Image: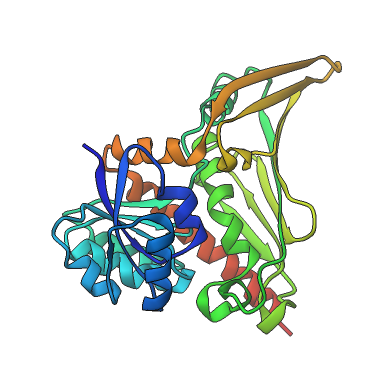
Amino acid sequence: MPLEIGLIGATGIAVRTMLGQPSVDVRAVAAGDPVRAKEFAGRYDIPLVYQNYSALLADPAIDAVYISLHNSAHLRWAVRAAVAGKDVIVEKPLCLTAAEAEELCFAAADTRVFEAVATAGHPWQSAVRSFIESSRYGVLREVRTRMTFAVPATGGYRDRPDLGGGIFYDCASYWLQALQATIGLDPTAYEGHSAFDGPNGVDRDFEASLRWASGAEATLTCAVGAQHVAEHLFTFDDATVKLRNFLRPVLGRIPLNLVVTAADGDREVIAFPPTAYYEQQLVRILDDDGDDLAAAVPRIGLMEAIYSDALARREAP
């Protein structure tokens, strides 16, 4: 039986993530502007429109809600949804601080909360983790991640630091989840760097780094730019393992390949079947064993620490 979903936010990402998926029925929508919610419902054949988010949460037929508001509103409505007894799916980042994550864990004692990191669970992650654990290519020395997203629409929340905007918050969940699934998320040191010179002092470029006790390092370089980039490069003693275009399956059923280049120049391509991230994400949520929120908490804490470090470096005399 499909999950009955309510949408908190009439957004494009809600269309791509929830609408048309066989495992869910979108029952209702609410938005900050009721007129926009009504137009959205008419466009996508959503049966019910609620005048506000609280009214939607009061609908007993809704099993779960999907929240796709600006980042600083995630906590408030995720907590209210959890208290209302709904399962909660929150667009990434789940929330913005470790204290917020702790508050959400308390509120969600009797329900389930998921951070919608669409890339999570793809088999390339378990493959790379097996390379690390088996030392198949020697010891892992470095992980480099590069991400570039398009310039955001003028006037949107992404240009508002007070609403949780900025390129780092757009990219951090993808980066940290990938590291958590491969090398593990227990670094001993971290740094963040940004000029914060975008509109309203938002970060339009950001560099983050982590270091593990083993000596392994991971870096994220992310920015707003004309050319979309999303790639990981794992450097081992005896080979590099590269994954390009890792976000492409948000567009539909698209294959991904790991390209392994040995120290002697030999190349091996490890191909994975075509995957549609949003379909996979819903399957993962429906089959959840209850630990998704627990896995997200350290990601949020580390994201906050890196962002705070960058702010402190900018403000230091």
- Horizontal side of 157 relative to 314 (left or right) equals left
Percent position of residue 2, x then y: 25, 40
Q: Determine which quarter of the picture holds residue 230.
A: top right
Question: Which quadrant of the figure contains the C terminus?
Answer: bottom right
- Looking at the image, which residue sits at the far left? 60
Is there any visible trace of residue 237 in the rendered image?
no
Position of the N terminus, as image quadrant, is top left
Note whether residue 10 is visible: yes
Q: Identify the residue at horizontal 63%, vertical 48% (top origin).
A: 211
Q: Is residue 267 left or right of residue 130?
A: right
Question: In the image, 246: left or right of 76?
Answer: right
Q: Find residue 86 and report its horizontal and vertical position in percent.
A: 21, 57
- Residue drawn at (34%, 51%), measured in percent from left and top? 293
User: How was the colour assigned to the protein in this rendering?
Assistant: rainbow
**Residue 124, placed above or below residue 282:** above
Q: Quadrant of residue 59?
A: bottom left
Occupied quadrant, residue 33: bottom left
Q: Is residue 168 left or right of residue 26?
A: right
**Residue at horizontal 37 percent and vertical 70 percent from the top:** 38
Q: Is residue 9 above or below residue 136?
A: below
Residue 267 image point, x, y percent = 79, 17
Between 32 and 102, the residue placed more toward the observer is 32
- Residue 158 point in image, percent of width and height: 60, 71
Name the residue nearer the viewer: 46 or 233. Answer: 46
Looking at the picture, does residue 138 appear above or below residue 34? Answer: above
Number of callouts in the render?
0
